[in-house]
Amino acid sequence: MVAAHLTCPTNVLESAVQQLDDAAAMIDLDPAIHAKLRRPRRALIVSVPTHMDDGRFEVFLGYRVQHNMDRGPCKGGIRYHPCVTLDEVTALAMWMTWKCAVVNIPYGGGKGGVICDPACMSMDELERLTRRFTAELIEVIGPEEDIPAPDVNTSDRIMGWLMDTYSMQVGHSVPAVVTGKPIAIGGSLGRAQATGRGIVFVAREALRTRGMSVAGATAAVQGFGKVGGAFAELFAEMGAKVIAVSDVSGGVINQAGLDVAALTRHVIDTGRVAGFAGGDAITNDELLALECDVLVPAALENVFTADNAASVRAKMIVEGANGPTTPEAHSIFTERDVFVVPDILANAGGVTVSYFEWCQGLQHLFWTEDEVNRRLESVMVNAYNEVYACACERRIDMRSAAMAVAVGRVAEAIRLRGIYP
Ligand code: NAD
Protein backbone atom coordinates (compact mmCIF):
# COMPACT_ATOMS: atom_id res chain seq x y z
CA MET A 1 0.00 0.00 0.00
CA VAL A 2 1.37 3.43 -0.89
CA ALA A 3 0.42 6.17 1.54
CA ALA A 4 -1.54 8.93 -0.19
CA HIS A 5 0.84 11.74 0.80
CA LEU A 6 3.85 10.14 -0.85
CA THR A 7 5.04 10.87 -4.35
CA CYS A 8 7.18 7.97 -5.47
CA PRO A 9 10.40 9.04 -7.17
CA THR A 10 10.78 8.04 -10.80
CA ASN A 11 13.72 7.93 -13.18
CA VAL A 12 16.35 7.91 -10.42
CA LEU A 13 18.29 5.21 -12.25
CA GLU A 14 18.28 7.26 -15.44
CA SER A 15 19.64 10.18 -13.41
CA ALA A 16 22.37 8.04 -11.87
CA VAL A 17 23.44 6.56 -15.22
CA GLN A 18 23.35 10.00 -16.83
CA GLN A 19 25.71 11.32 -14.13
CA LEU A 20 28.10 8.43 -14.83
CA ASP A 21 27.90 9.03 -18.60
CA ASP A 22 28.70 12.73 -18.08
CA ALA A 23 31.66 11.88 -15.84
CA ALA A 24 32.89 9.27 -18.31
CA ALA A 25 32.93 11.85 -21.11
CA MET A 26 34.69 14.35 -18.86
CA ILE A 27 37.54 12.06 -17.80
CA ASP A 28 37.77 10.17 -21.09
CA LEU A 29 36.89 6.89 -19.40
CA ASP A 30 37.82 3.61 -21.10
CA PRO A 31 34.55 2.51 -22.84
CA ALA A 32 34.81 -1.04 -21.45
CA ILE A 33 35.15 0.21 -17.87
CA HIS A 34 32.30 2.63 -18.53
CA ALA A 35 30.10 -0.25 -19.71
CA LYS A 36 31.00 -2.27 -16.59
CA LEU A 37 30.06 0.61 -14.30
CA ARG A 38 26.73 1.33 -16.02
CA ARG A 39 25.32 -1.91 -14.58
CA PRO A 40 25.38 -3.39 -11.09
CA ARG A 41 27.57 -6.40 -10.51
CA ARG A 42 24.67 -8.28 -8.96
CA ALA A 43 21.02 -7.68 -8.04
CA LEU A 44 19.04 -10.00 -5.82
CA ILE A 45 15.23 -10.00 -5.62
CA VAL A 46 13.71 -11.86 -2.69
CA SER A 47 10.26 -12.64 -1.33
CA VAL A 48 9.99 -11.94 2.37
CA PRO A 49 7.05 -13.85 3.86
CA THR A 50 6.32 -12.34 7.26
CA HIS A 51 3.90 -13.30 10.02
CA MET A 52 1.65 -10.35 10.85
CA ASP A 53 0.22 -9.74 14.31
CA ASP A 54 -3.28 -10.84 13.22
CA GLY A 55 -2.05 -14.36 12.39
CA ARG A 56 -1.91 -13.97 8.58
CA PHE A 57 1.39 -13.82 6.75
CA GLU A 58 2.14 -11.24 4.14
CA VAL A 59 4.72 -11.53 1.37
CA PHE A 60 6.90 -8.45 0.97
CA LEU A 61 9.32 -7.85 -1.88
CA GLY A 62 12.95 -7.08 -1.05
CA TYR A 63 16.07 -6.19 -3.00
CA ARG A 64 19.83 -6.07 -2.48
CA VAL A 65 21.92 -4.60 -5.26
CA GLN A 66 25.73 -4.72 -5.33
CA HIS A 67 27.02 -2.21 -7.82
CA ASN A 68 30.79 -2.58 -7.59
CA MET A 69 33.39 -4.38 -5.47
CA ASP A 70 36.66 -3.33 -7.09
CA ARG A 71 37.76 -1.09 -4.19
CA GLY A 72 36.47 -3.38 -1.43
CA PRO A 73 33.29 -5.02 -0.13
CA CYS A 74 29.92 -3.43 -0.91
CA LYS A 75 28.55 -0.96 1.59
CA GLY A 76 25.12 0.59 1.72
CA GLY A 77 21.91 1.03 3.63
CA ILE A 78 18.62 -0.82 3.70
CA ARG A 79 15.47 1.19 3.12
CA TYR A 80 11.93 0.27 4.19
CA HIS A 81 9.48 2.32 2.16
CA PRO A 82 6.34 1.81 0.06
CA CYS A 83 8.05 3.37 -2.97
CA VAL A 84 11.14 1.13 -3.06
CA THR A 85 11.84 -0.19 -6.59
CA LEU A 86 14.68 -2.21 -8.09
CA ASP A 87 15.67 0.82 -10.18
CA GLU A 88 15.79 3.05 -7.12
CA VAL A 89 17.89 0.55 -5.16
CA THR A 90 20.23 0.16 -8.15
CA ALA A 91 20.68 3.93 -8.43
CA LEU A 92 21.35 4.18 -4.70
CA ALA A 93 23.91 1.34 -4.92
CA MET A 94 25.68 3.15 -7.77
CA TRP A 95 25.78 6.38 -5.77
CA MET A 96 27.29 4.43 -2.86
CA THR A 97 30.16 3.33 -5.12
CA TRP A 98 30.94 6.96 -5.96
CA LYS A 99 30.41 8.10 -2.36
CA CYS A 100 32.91 5.60 -0.93
CA ALA A 101 35.38 6.50 -3.66
CA VAL A 102 35.04 10.26 -3.23
CA VAL A 103 35.91 10.06 0.48
CA ASN A 104 38.48 7.36 -0.36
CA ILE A 105 37.32 4.56 1.92
CA PRO A 106 37.89 0.97 0.76
CA TYR A 107 34.38 -0.03 -0.24
CA GLY A 108 32.20 -0.46 -3.29
CA GLY A 109 28.53 0.42 -3.40
CA GLY A 110 25.52 -1.63 -2.39
CA LYS A 111 21.96 -0.89 -1.31
CA GLY A 112 18.89 -2.78 -0.21
CA GLY A 113 15.23 -2.16 0.30
CA VAL A 114 11.91 -3.75 1.14
CA ILE A 115 8.60 -2.49 -0.22
CA CYS A 116 6.62 -1.95 2.97
CA ASP A 117 5.10 0.84 5.00
CA PRO A 118 6.72 0.69 8.46
CA ALA A 119 4.29 3.36 9.70
CA CYS A 120 1.55 0.70 9.43
CA MET A 121 3.58 -2.12 11.04
CA SER A 122 4.23 -3.07 14.67
CA MET A 123 7.76 -3.51 16.04
CA ASP A 124 7.19 -7.29 16.17
CA GLU A 125 6.20 -7.32 12.51
CA LEU A 126 9.25 -5.24 11.61
CA GLU A 127 11.50 -7.60 13.55
CA ARG A 128 10.10 -10.68 11.77
CA LEU A 129 10.37 -8.92 8.39
CA THR A 130 13.99 -7.93 9.11
CA ARG A 131 15.01 -11.39 10.28
CA ARG A 132 13.47 -13.11 7.25
CA PHE A 133 14.94 -10.53 4.85
CA THR A 134 18.38 -11.08 6.43
CA ALA A 135 18.00 -14.85 6.07
CA GLU A 136 17.17 -14.38 2.38
CA LEU A 137 20.32 -12.25 1.90
CA ILE A 138 22.61 -14.58 3.84
CA GLU A 139 24.49 -15.79 0.74
CA VAL A 140 25.45 -12.32 -0.43
CA ILE A 141 26.12 -10.29 2.73
CA GLY A 142 29.01 -10.61 5.18
CA PRO A 143 31.84 -8.54 6.65
CA GLU A 144 34.08 -9.22 3.64
CA GLU A 145 31.31 -9.15 1.00
CA ASP A 146 28.57 -6.65 1.64
CA ILE A 147 27.87 -4.70 4.82
CA PRO A 148 24.36 -3.18 5.21
CA ALA A 149 23.52 -0.10 7.29
CA PRO A 150 20.43 1.99 8.13
CA ASP A 151 18.66 4.16 5.57
CA VAL A 152 15.16 5.63 5.32
CA ASN A 153 12.89 4.08 7.99
CA THR A 154 15.52 1.65 9.27
CA SER A 155 17.11 2.15 12.66
CA ASP A 156 19.92 0.91 14.90
CA ARG A 157 17.41 -1.52 16.40
CA ILE A 158 16.75 -3.03 12.99
CA MET A 159 20.50 -3.32 12.36
CA GLY A 160 20.80 -5.17 15.68
CA TRP A 161 18.23 -7.75 14.51
CA LEU A 162 20.10 -8.09 11.22
CA MET A 163 23.40 -8.67 13.05
CA ASP A 164 21.80 -11.20 15.39
CA THR A 165 20.12 -13.13 12.57
CA TYR A 166 23.35 -13.33 10.57
CA SER A 167 25.31 -14.33 13.67
CA MET A 168 22.80 -17.08 14.53
CA GLN A 169 23.13 -18.51 11.02
CA VAL A 170 26.94 -18.64 11.06
CA GLY A 171 27.19 -19.72 14.69
CA HIS A 172 29.14 -16.85 16.27
CA SER A 173 28.81 -13.10 16.74
CA VAL A 174 29.74 -11.12 13.63
CA PRO A 175 29.49 -7.43 14.56
CA ALA A 176 31.18 -6.33 11.32
CA VAL A 177 28.34 -7.68 9.13
CA VAL A 178 26.35 -4.50 9.62
CA THR A 179 26.95 -0.92 10.73
CA GLY A 180 24.70 1.54 12.48
CA LYS A 181 24.10 -1.04 15.25
CA PRO A 182 23.31 -0.13 18.85
CA ILE A 183 26.49 0.78 20.77
CA ALA A 184 25.97 -2.09 23.25
CA ILE A 185 26.45 -4.71 20.53
CA GLY A 186 29.36 -3.14 18.66
CA GLY A 187 28.00 0.09 17.23
CA SER A 188 30.36 3.05 16.98
CA LEU A 189 30.15 6.10 19.15
CA GLY A 190 29.30 9.04 16.90
CA ARG A 191 27.55 6.93 14.23
CA ALA A 192 24.03 8.15 14.97
CA GLN A 193 24.89 11.77 14.14
CA ALA A 194 27.67 11.04 11.64
CA THR A 195 25.84 11.91 8.42
CA GLY A 196 24.50 15.17 9.86
CA ARG A 197 27.90 15.99 11.38
CA GLY A 198 29.61 15.30 8.04
CA ILE A 199 27.16 17.68 6.30
CA VAL A 200 28.03 20.32 8.90
CA PHE A 201 31.75 19.93 8.10
CA VAL A 202 31.26 20.26 4.34
CA ALA A 203 28.75 23.11 4.76
CA ARG A 204 31.37 24.91 6.89
CA GLU A 205 34.04 24.35 4.21
CA ALA A 206 31.66 25.39 1.45
CA LEU A 207 30.77 28.60 3.29
CA ARG A 208 34.49 29.26 3.84
CA THR A 209 35.39 28.79 0.18
CA ARG A 210 32.50 31.10 -0.78
CA GLY A 211 33.73 33.80 1.61
CA MET A 212 31.09 33.23 4.33
CA SER A 213 31.12 31.64 7.76
CA VAL A 214 28.82 29.42 9.82
CA ALA A 215 28.23 32.07 12.48
CA GLY A 216 24.96 33.73 11.55
CA ALA A 217 24.51 31.76 8.31
CA THR A 218 20.86 30.92 7.67
CA ALA A 219 19.78 27.38 6.86
CA ALA A 220 16.61 25.59 5.76
CA VAL A 221 16.32 21.84 6.10
CA GLN A 222 13.86 19.53 4.35
CA GLY A 223 13.50 16.26 6.31
CA PHE A 224 13.93 16.04 10.06
CA GLY A 225 14.96 12.42 10.45
CA LYS A 226 18.35 10.93 11.25
CA VAL A 227 20.15 13.15 8.75
CA GLY A 228 18.20 16.42 8.73
CA GLY A 229 17.61 16.34 12.49
CA ALA A 230 21.28 15.85 13.39
CA PHE A 231 22.42 18.44 10.84
CA ALA A 232 19.97 21.07 12.14
CA GLU A 233 20.98 20.46 15.74
CA LEU A 234 24.75 20.56 15.14
CA PHE A 235 24.65 23.47 12.69
CA ALA A 236 22.63 25.52 15.18
CA GLU A 237 25.10 24.58 17.95
CA MET A 238 27.90 25.93 15.72
CA GLY A 239 26.22 29.32 15.53
CA ALA A 240 24.10 29.05 12.37
CA LYS A 241 20.47 30.14 12.30
CA VAL A 242 18.20 27.28 11.25
CA ILE A 243 15.20 29.25 10.00
CA ALA A 244 13.02 26.48 8.56
CA VAL A 245 12.58 22.74 8.88
CA SER A 246 10.05 20.33 7.40
CA ASP A 247 9.16 16.67 7.35
CA VAL A 248 6.49 14.65 5.61
CA SER A 249 3.82 16.35 7.79
CA GLY A 250 4.78 19.91 6.71
CA GLY A 251 7.16 22.51 8.04
CA VAL A 252 7.82 25.43 10.38
CA ILE A 253 9.62 28.71 9.84
CA ASN A 254 11.05 31.31 12.19
CA GLN A 255 13.25 33.98 10.60
CA ALA A 256 14.85 34.66 14.00
CA GLY A 257 16.04 31.04 14.11
CA LEU A 258 14.18 27.97 15.32
CA ASP A 259 14.92 26.50 18.74
CA VAL A 260 16.11 23.20 17.27
CA ALA A 261 16.39 21.44 20.64
CA ALA A 262 12.75 22.36 21.45
CA LEU A 263 11.68 21.26 17.95
CA THR A 264 13.44 17.92 18.47
CA ARG A 265 11.53 17.41 21.72
CA HIS A 266 8.28 18.31 19.92
CA VAL A 267 9.03 15.72 17.20
CA ILE A 268 9.85 13.07 19.82
CA ASP A 269 6.55 13.81 21.59
CA THR A 270 4.25 14.13 18.57
CA GLY A 271 6.12 12.30 15.79
CA ARG A 272 5.87 15.30 13.45
CA VAL A 273 7.33 18.74 12.77
CA ALA A 274 3.94 20.31 11.99
CA GLY A 275 2.28 21.94 14.98
CA PHE A 276 5.51 23.18 16.58
CA ALA A 277 4.65 26.32 18.52
CA GLY A 278 8.04 28.00 18.01
CA GLY A 279 7.40 28.96 14.37
CA ASP A 280 4.81 29.52 11.65
CA ALA A 281 3.56 26.79 9.35
CA ILE A 282 5.24 26.46 5.95
CA THR A 283 4.82 23.91 3.17
CA ASN A 284 7.65 21.81 1.78
CA ASP A 285 7.45 23.67 -1.54
CA GLU A 286 7.73 27.04 0.22
CA LEU A 287 10.73 25.82 2.22
CA LEU A 288 12.59 24.83 -0.95
CA ALA A 289 12.12 28.35 -2.36
CA LEU A 290 13.23 30.23 0.79
CA GLU A 291 15.94 32.84 0.66
CA CYS A 292 18.76 31.48 2.87
CA ASP A 293 22.49 30.75 2.80
CA VAL A 294 22.35 26.95 3.02
CA LEU A 295 19.49 24.73 1.85
CA VAL A 296 19.75 21.08 2.91
CA PRO A 297 17.41 18.55 1.31
CA ALA A 298 17.46 15.60 3.73
CA ALA A 299 14.35 13.58 2.78
CA LEU A 300 14.04 11.65 -0.48
CA GLU A 301 15.12 11.78 -4.15
CA ASN A 302 13.98 14.08 -6.97
CA VAL A 303 13.15 17.06 -4.77
CA PHE A 304 14.66 19.56 -7.22
CA THR A 305 13.24 19.17 -10.72
CA ALA A 306 12.86 21.22 -13.88
CA ASP A 307 9.63 22.55 -12.33
CA ASN A 308 11.07 24.12 -9.17
CA ALA A 309 14.85 24.55 -9.67
CA ALA A 310 14.45 28.08 -11.03
CA SER A 311 12.60 29.14 -7.88
CA VAL A 312 15.37 28.10 -5.47
CA ARG A 313 16.80 31.25 -3.82
CA ALA A 314 19.36 29.65 -1.48
CA LYS A 315 22.99 30.69 -1.98
CA MET A 316 24.08 27.08 -1.75
CA ILE A 317 22.55 23.62 -1.59
CA VAL A 318 24.26 20.95 0.49
CA GLU A 319 22.66 17.63 -0.42
CA GLY A 320 21.89 15.55 2.67
CA ALA A 321 19.52 13.20 0.82
CA ASN A 322 20.67 10.89 -1.91
CA GLY A 323 19.69 12.02 -5.40
CA PRO A 324 17.60 15.09 -4.50
CA THR A 325 18.51 16.86 -7.77
CA THR A 326 17.38 15.61 -11.19
CA PRO A 327 19.77 16.13 -14.15
CA GLU A 328 17.44 18.88 -15.46
CA ALA A 329 17.55 20.71 -12.12
CA HIS A 330 21.33 20.24 -12.02
CA SER A 331 21.62 22.03 -15.38
CA ILE A 332 19.43 24.88 -14.14
CA PHE A 333 21.53 25.25 -10.95
CA THR A 334 24.75 25.25 -13.00
CA GLU A 335 23.37 27.94 -15.35
CA ARG A 336 22.18 30.02 -12.39
CA ASP A 337 25.49 29.53 -10.55
CA VAL A 338 23.82 28.01 -7.47
CA PHE A 339 26.69 26.37 -5.58
CA VAL A 340 25.76 22.71 -4.94
CA VAL A 341 27.72 20.33 -2.73
CA PRO A 342 26.58 17.00 -4.17
CA ASP A 343 25.14 14.10 -2.20
CA ILE A 344 28.04 11.72 -2.77
CA LEU A 345 30.32 14.17 -0.99
CA ALA A 346 27.98 15.98 1.40
CA ASN A 347 26.30 12.98 3.02
CA ALA A 348 29.35 10.67 3.05
CA GLY A 349 29.84 11.16 6.81
CA GLY A 350 27.48 8.26 7.54
CA VAL A 351 29.37 5.74 5.47
CA THR A 352 32.67 7.11 6.76
CA VAL A 353 31.75 6.41 10.38
CA SER A 354 30.23 3.11 9.23
CA TYR A 355 33.70 2.34 7.92
CA PHE A 356 35.11 3.25 11.34
CA GLU A 357 32.50 1.01 12.98
CA TRP A 358 33.45 -1.87 10.66
CA CYS A 359 37.16 -1.40 11.45
CA GLN A 360 36.38 -1.38 15.19
CA GLY A 361 34.18 -4.49 14.79
CA LEU A 362 36.87 -6.41 12.91
CA GLN A 363 39.47 -5.50 15.53
CA HIS A 364 37.19 -5.66 18.60
CA LEU A 365 38.90 -2.46 19.62
CA PHE A 366 36.71 0.59 20.19
CA TRP A 367 37.44 4.29 19.82
CA THR A 368 36.28 7.27 21.83
CA GLU A 369 33.60 9.53 20.36
CA ASP A 370 36.13 12.30 20.16
CA GLU A 371 38.46 10.17 18.05
CA VAL A 372 35.59 9.16 15.75
CA ASN A 373 34.56 12.80 15.25
CA ARG A 374 38.14 13.98 14.67
CA ARG A 375 38.78 11.29 12.07
CA LEU A 376 35.42 12.08 10.43
CA GLU A 377 36.30 15.75 10.20
CA SER A 378 39.64 14.92 8.62
CA VAL A 379 38.06 12.62 5.99
CA MET A 380 35.29 15.10 5.11
CA VAL A 381 37.53 18.15 4.92
CA ASN A 382 40.12 16.32 2.78
CA ALA A 383 37.42 15.06 0.44
CA TYR A 384 35.84 18.51 0.16
CA ASN A 385 39.21 20.09 -0.62
CA GLU A 386 40.07 17.46 -3.26
CA VAL A 387 36.73 17.93 -5.00
CA TYR A 388 36.92 21.72 -4.74
CA ALA A 389 40.44 21.71 -6.19
CA CYS A 390 39.26 19.52 -9.09
CA ALA A 391 36.28 21.87 -9.69
CA CYS A 392 38.57 24.91 -9.76
CA GLU A 393 41.21 23.24 -11.91
CA ARG A 394 38.74 21.93 -14.51
CA ARG A 395 36.38 24.92 -14.15
CA ILE A 396 33.43 22.62 -13.50
CA ASP A 397 30.67 22.42 -10.90
CA MET A 398 31.13 20.47 -7.68
CA ARG A 399 28.93 17.52 -8.72
CA SER A 400 30.89 17.00 -11.91
CA ALA A 401 34.13 17.34 -9.95
CA ALA A 402 33.03 14.82 -7.29
CA MET A 403 32.04 12.39 -10.02
CA ALA A 404 35.34 12.93 -11.85
CA VAL A 405 37.30 12.16 -8.67
CA ALA A 406 35.12 9.17 -7.72
CA VAL A 407 34.77 7.51 -11.12
CA GLY A 408 38.47 8.06 -11.73
CA ARG A 409 39.34 6.19 -8.51
CA VAL A 410 37.02 3.27 -9.28
CA ALA A 411 38.31 3.06 -12.86
CA GLU A 412 41.88 2.98 -11.59
CA ALA A 413 41.01 0.07 -9.26
CA ILE A 414 39.41 -1.84 -12.16
CA ARG A 415 42.45 -1.20 -14.38
CA LEU A 416 44.89 -2.33 -11.67
CA ARG A 417 42.93 -5.45 -10.75
CA GLY A 418 42.12 -6.40 -14.35
CA ILE A 419 39.18 -8.51 -15.45
CA TYR A 420 38.91 -12.06 -14.10
CA PRO A 421 39.76 -14.60 -15.50
P1 NAD B 1 14.72 9.17 8.06
O1 NAD B 1 13.67 8.16 7.75
O2 NAD B 1 15.35 9.15 9.41
O3 NAD B 1 14.15 10.65 7.81
C1 NAD B 1 13.54 11.03 6.63
C2 NAD B 1 12.87 12.39 6.87
O4 NAD B 1 12.33 12.86 5.63
C3 NAD B 1 11.70 12.34 7.85
O5 NAD B 1 11.69 13.51 8.65
C4 NAD B 1 10.47 12.32 6.93
O6 NAD B 1 9.31 12.83 7.54
C5 NAD B 1 10.97 13.23 5.83
N1 NAD B 1 10.22 13.04 4.58
C6 NAD B 1 9.88 11.89 3.97
N2 NAD B 1 9.14 12.14 2.86
C7 NAD B 1 9.06 13.48 2.77
C8 NAD B 1 8.42 14.34 1.86
N3 NAD B 1 7.75 13.87 0.81
N4 NAD B 1 8.54 15.67 2.08
C9 NAD B 1 9.22 16.17 3.16
N5 NAD B 1 9.83 15.40 4.06
C10 NAD B 1 9.76 14.07 3.87
O7 NAD B 1 15.81 9.01 6.90
P2 NAD B 1 17.32 9.51 6.91
O8 NAD B 1 18.18 8.39 7.33
O9 NAD B 1 17.38 10.82 7.61
O10 NAD B 1 17.58 9.70 5.35
C11 NAD B 1 17.21 10.89 4.66
C12 NAD B 1 17.97 10.93 3.35
O11 NAD B 1 19.36 10.91 3.62
C13 NAD B 1 17.71 9.75 2.39
O12 NAD B 1 17.82 10.22 1.07
C14 NAD B 1 18.88 8.82 2.70
O13 NAD B 1 19.15 7.96 1.61
C15 NAD B 1 19.97 9.83 2.91
N6 NAD B 1 21.12 9.35 3.68
C16 NAD B 1 20.97 8.80 4.92
C17 NAD B 1 22.10 8.43 5.64
C18 NAD B 1 22.01 7.90 7.06
O14 NAD B 1 23.07 7.73 7.69
N7 NAD B 1 20.83 7.70 7.60
C19 NAD B 1 23.36 8.56 5.07
C20 NAD B 1 23.48 9.14 3.80
C21 NAD B 1 22.34 9.53 3.13
Image (spheres, rainbow, N blue to C red):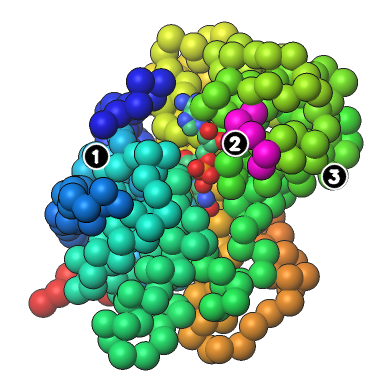
Bin the neighbour count of mark 1 within 10 Å (Cα to Cα): few under 14, some 14-19, many 20 and up: many
Give the structural element (helix, strand or loop) at label 2. loop
Of the residues under marks 2 and 1, which one precedes in the sequence?
A: 1
Magenta stretch bounds: 268-273
Q: Is residue 9 left or right of residue 246?
A: left
Of the residues under marks 2 and 3, which one precedes in the sequence?
A: 3
Under mark 2, the amino acid is Gly
Bin the neighbour count of mark 3 within 10 Å (Cα to Cα): few under 14, some 14-19, many 20 and up: some
Q: Is residue 290 left or right of residue 325?
A: right
Q: Is residue 199 left or right of residue 175?
A: right
Q: Residue at x 57, y 9 (%)?
A: 311
Q: Position of residue 46 (x, y in %)?
A: 16, 56
Q: Residue at x 85, y 44 (%)?
A: 238
Mark pair 2, 3: CA separation: 26 Å
Please state which of the two labelled residues, at mark 3 or mark 1, is closer to the viewer: 1
Q: Residue at x 55, y 78 (%)?
A: 186
Task: Please identify the quarter of the rendering in which residue 81 is found.
Answer: top left
On whether residue 272 falls in the magenta region, the answer is yes
Mark on residue 271? 2
Mark pair 2, 1: CA separation: 26 Å
As drawn, 12 above or below 72: above
Please state which of the two labelled residues, at mark 2 or mark 3, is closer to the viewer: 2
Q: Position of residue 245 (x, y in %)?
A: 67, 27
As drawn, 73 above or below 325: below
Give the residue number, with chain letter if any, for mark 1: 85
Task: Please identify the quarter of the rendering in which residue 165 is found.
Answer: bottom left
Give the residue number, with chain letter if any, for mark 3: 238
| Disc 3 residue lies near ligand 1 with CB under 8 A | no
On whether residue 33 falls in the magenta region, the answer is no
Under mark 1, the amino acid is Thr
